[in-house]
Image: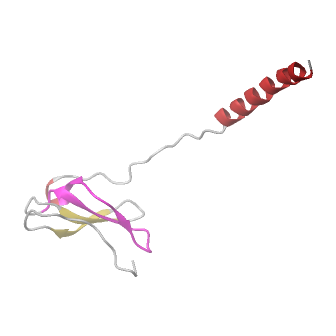
Amino acid sequence: MLHSAKRPMLAPLVLAASISSVGAANAQTFNVIYTFPGGAGGALPLGKIATDSSGNIWGTTISGGTAGFGIIYKVSPAGTGSVVYSFPAPGHHSTQLDPEG
């Protein structure tokens, strides 16, 4: 009888823990900070991105640029994009910053 008297108290504790953990879930929202225009401005960003100490985002695309083989781009914290380099030939393009950023 002592064992069955403790059981009814267990259910409300488990239910309370379940309800409180459901309420703790946070929704995520994302904002578009830059849209690639295509053509000489680059298209189809692919691969890793890097950030520097000023908050700029650096990366590569696999299409666009003056020769059509992709670009190295930089997007400022304000959302202004610029072409840093246009690849003259196809290849494997990736982004990596030096130790100083």
Q: Position of residue 1 (x, y in %)?
A: 91, 17
- What is the quadrant of residue 40 in the picture? bottom left
Image position of 27 with respect to 76: above or below: above
User: In percent of the image, x 12 and y 64: which residue is there?
Assistant: 91
- What is the quadrant of residue 94 in the picture? bottom left
For residue 74, side relative to residue 21 (left or right): left
Q: Nearer the viewer, residue 3 or 75?
A: 3
**Is residue 43 shown in magenta?**
yes
Q: Nearer the viewer, residue 20 or 83?
A: 20
What span is in magenta? 41-65
**Is residue 8 shown in magenta?**
no
For residue 87, side relative to residue 56 (left or right): left
Q: Nearer the viewer, residue 83 or 88?
A: 88
Q: Position of residue 7 (x, y in %)?
A: 83, 22
User: In percent of the image, x 25 and y 55: which residue is there?
Assistant: 46
Quarter the C terminus occupies:
bottom left
Image position of 60 with respect to 13: above or below: below
